[in-house]
Image (cartoon, helix red, strand yellow):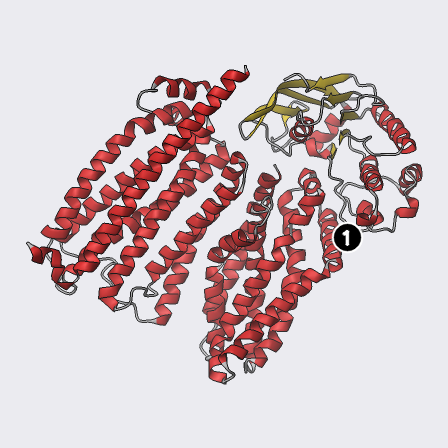
Amino acid sequence: MNFKSIYKLGSPPLFYKLCIALEPWFLISSILLIAVGMYSGLFVAPPDDEMGDAFRIIYFHVPSAYVSMMAYVYMGAAAIIGLIWRSNVAFSLAKSCAPIGASFTFLALVTGMLWGKPMWGTAWVWDARLTSELILLFLYLAYMMLHLSIPDRAKADRSASLLAIVGMVNIPIIHYSVVWWNTLHQASTISKFAKPSIATEMLWPLIIMILAYTLLFAAFLSKRTAAELAVREKRTRWIQTLILGDKSNA
Amino acid sequence: MKQEDRRSVTHHNLQSNFLELYRSDHLIFSNISFELSEGQHLLISGANGTGKTSLLRVICGLTIPTDGTVMWDELATNNVDCTYHHHLAYLGHKNALISELTAKENLEYSLDRHRSVMSTNRILEAFDLNKYLDQYAEKLSNGQMRKVALTRILLSDKTLWILDEPLANIDPPGKQFLLTEMQAHLERGGMLITTSNVNNETLKSNLEINLDNP
Amino acid sequence: MIDVLRIVFLRDLKVSLRRWTDVLTSLILFVLVSLVFPLTLGNDSTMLLKIVGPVMLVSALLANLLAMQNIFRPDVINGSLEQLTLSSYPLTWIICTKIFSFWLITSLPLLLISGFIASSYYVTGNSILIVILTLLLSTPSLVHISALAAALTVAIRYPGALMALIIIPLSLPIMIFGSKAIEFSISGIDVSAPLYFLLGMMFFTCSLGPIVTASAIRISID
Amino acid sequence: MPEIFAMDGYGFYVWGSVLISVAVLIINWITAHNLFKSNINEVKLFMNETKDKN
């Protein structure tokens, strides 16, 4: 089994080079996909019989909600690896996941509200999914605030990772208690972005957009992780040669 | 704990190799290696702020070093079946006295008190703490608090004592008694690590680590 | 091992009793918050009956948030928490007893008072018992979550806002199910579902909480 | 062409979400880029410091 190569991937210099190399590719491919996805989502896909064109917001709401959820799980996993093997790579990954995840959660919330306005008349509707997104935003804020308020970077990494793990474990519990609470209050609202069994020609732009958002997340993540890793490893020889090496485009 | 009994006959030893510590990217100390066996005293000297306290905290396992390991009886201290903390008594700058409790309660409630009442009185007599026993810890003076903390260390029959500037702000008779107690501890086969920046009347040490030269 | 835990437990109990002002602040806060709502909402019984659940839970949460700020902080300042981490006994169990003694001191009085407050909200019959039972089942989880937040923020100078930001999102399930349990009991619906969930949450946090809090303390003391 | 932008009456919401999404993504990229640049400078600063010291 190629455990060796996986372990080698964890070594900071290799990971740093990987991030620097892959980042432009992620960016370009995601921009292309977004262009295709947006065009097909906004113009090509047929309007929904019930909601008319307002349903097109789904192409912006579902991908960002998906990425925000994925980012937190990714952050939790990186936190676990970081705490067990005390590796700077994992801590940098966890730290850079937080702001990106928080921005996608904010995006999901705003598009959710813009979706709610035409659909139910009021921007903020205590729908189970929107409320869970809001709580997820607070979990991200808690991680970032904790990380910022501890001066020593190594201690901040480890304490915040602990909070990320506890948060990740609690996400399903919070989600299902909100869903249970929501079913009590109003009959489950027929909302398009519960499992949408929408026609295929509406579906494939959504798939493209989800893929595009994930690639975009990967691009931002590798850029930020490279930055965080460089700062954490600034004493080492390899980062200094790398920095001096590419003096031109830094 | 069968393994423990068989070992207690043989000598314990504390060993550290190539310890190194960075605090948010600036070097505190590096490349510290020593081997301490029973009956020996290690003195860590150096000016203020050269990392003596950090080195002590690394040795006793409070701070995790950036590099290097601390070994007790050939087992790394963070190993699960290492009995390091069974034999360790640490006293840092903070006296670990709870201010709401009286001095006597502080001594009673410390986790590792096994010694008999007789030896307790002997130490309290020497430090003349008897009349302050019922005072709340916060009302005691610095020196008295230090003495109560030191009494707790002297009472705990642990093999390894790690003391951070034990002789600081203690009056001469107390200092004298402490020196004799430390000497008796070494003769009993105990181990001792102390730091001091005023290198006058410290205990003669078999080993010394000076943190002055960077 | 057990006598060590007994020592830690008795010591913390004695210290907390000597520091009784903290006990009182959490109690007073609980009563005051429950006092504010009837005064502001007027005292028609249907309204009060509807809000007694949330008021109880929210004031328990706020009381916890305040009281738990100094569970570890004084011990870190005077250095006795370092001695606990360095003792040869597992830190998790020591933290467990410390949290239990703090629960006894701050949250148990809340349970006793909540009965009277509930009756002042026109709650009658066995609903008062359900209110007390709900608080009994939800306060341990709240205490453990607040202890974790306290351990994470012990090295920070002004942890107030950060602790709230950590505690409230994590304790939302307890808030939801706790207030629902009280609401169900008042409107006569079967109460077992939310109570079972609260029980489940209690075991979940009380078993995993101390482990995470212990490692949080080892990290903060570093 | 204009009725495409109208999105049968919901134009404001659809295009609103499009604009916000694009804006947030661009802000994300800018902050990531700035962070990278400032961290690299920080490493360079640190290198110069250590170079003078020894």
Q: What residue is shown at x 93% (from left), y 39% (from top)?
A: B125
Compared to D20, does C53 lie above or below? below
Q: What residue is shown at x 42% (from left), y 32% (from top)?
A: A228
Q: Which amino acid type is shown beneath numbered disc 1?
A: Glu
- Residue reaching furthest to the bottom: C44
Q: What residue is shown at x 61% (from left), y 54% (from top)?
A: C69
- Nearest the eye: A245 or B18: A245
Query: Which residue position holds label 1?
Result: B100
Q: Secondary structure at mark 1?
A: loop
Compared to C10, does B86 lie above or below? above
- Residue reaching furthest to the left: D1
- Residue A207 location, x and y as percent? 20, 46
Q: Quadrant of the C terminus of chain B?
A: top right
Compared to D7, does C93 lie above or below? above
- Residue C200 location, x and y as percent? 50, 59
Whether residue A1 appears in this view of the structure is no
**Image quarter for residue B41?**
top right
- Residue B111 location, x and y as percent? 75, 43
Q: Is residue C95 left or right of residue A133?
A: right
Q: What residue is shown at x 59% (from left), y 31% (from top)?
A: B64
Compared to C57, does A88 lie above or below? above
- Nearest the eye: B76 or B92: B92
Q: Is residue B161 left or right of residue D14?
A: right
**Image quarter for residue C91?**
top right
- Nearest the eye: A202 or B113: A202
